[in-house]
Image (cartoon, rainbow, N blue to C red):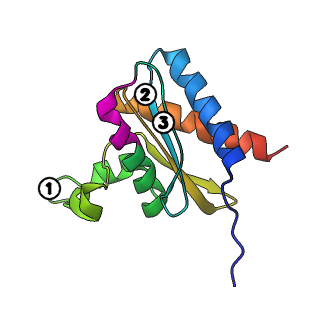
Amino acid sequence: MKTVPKLTLDDARVMMAAAEKKASEIGVDMDIAITDDSGSLLMFHRMDNARITSIDIAISKAFTAAAARKSTRAYGETSMPGGPSYGIHVSNHGRFMIVAGGLPIFVNNQIVGGIGCSSGHSDQDEVVSQAGIDALLTYLKR
């Protein structure tokens, strides 16, 4: 039997606060989603001026990162025609995201979840997601 760490609601709150703070710092209201290791939604927050059309995108980015255990950017780089992941974006009923902004959350080299952000440029989305992960890792070192 394997013992694995699990992301808690308190962990998600730490990540969400940091991600929202980073989004505010860069001046982009975001849709922010955090999932557990299975890709099931734990927490979602839409900042006041975040795009309504980005709600599903943020949730799907977090799902993809957790379920695939890989950043959505990495899939974007390999999913072009002729690439080794070409066509993957239509898997999971079209829920598989291939644009940056979704990152897997690893603790002690074990997947515990995913975080996905959307509403900004994909690089901005990824920076906000990373801020959430960085805050969690700092919090866990206490």
Query: Label 1 amino acid?
Result: Pro
Disc 3 secondary structure class: strand
Circle 3 or circle 1, nearest the eye: 3
Disc 1 secondary structure class: loop
What is the spatial separation of the Cα atoms under label 1 and label 2, in whole angstroms? 26 Å
What is the spatial separation of the Cα atoms under label 3 and label 2, in whole angstroms? 12 Å
Picture layout, residue 129 above or below residue 109: above
- The residue singled out by tag 1 in the image is 81
Q: Residue at x 33, y 53 (%)?
A: 75
Magenta span includes 93: no
Picture layout, residue 50 above or below residue 8: above
Query: Label 3 amino acid?
Result: Ile
- Boundaries of the magenta span: 50-58
Residue positioned most to the bottom: 1
Circle 3 or circle 2, nearest the eye: 3
Residue 112, position in %: x, y? 61, 58
Circle 1 or circle 2, nearest the eye: 2
Q: Residue at x 40, y 41 (%)?
A: 58
Q: Earlier in the sequence, mark 1 or mark 2?
A: 1
Q: Residue at x 45, y 21 (%)?
A: 29
Mark 2 residue crowding within 10 angstroms, few (<14) / some (14–19) / many (20+):
many
Q: Quadrant of the N terminus?
A: bottom right
- The residue singled out by tag 2 in the image is 124
CB-based contact (under 8 Å), mark 3 and mark 2: no
Residue 90, position in %: x, y? 21, 59
- The residue singled out by tag 3 in the image is 32
Picture layout, residue 121 above or below residue 96: above
Decide if residue 68 is in sight here. Answer: yes
Q: Is residue 81 left or right of residue 48?
A: left
Residue 103, position in %: x, y? 48, 47
Query: Label 2 amino acid?
Result: Gln
Q: Earlier in the sequence, mark 3 or mark 1?
A: 3
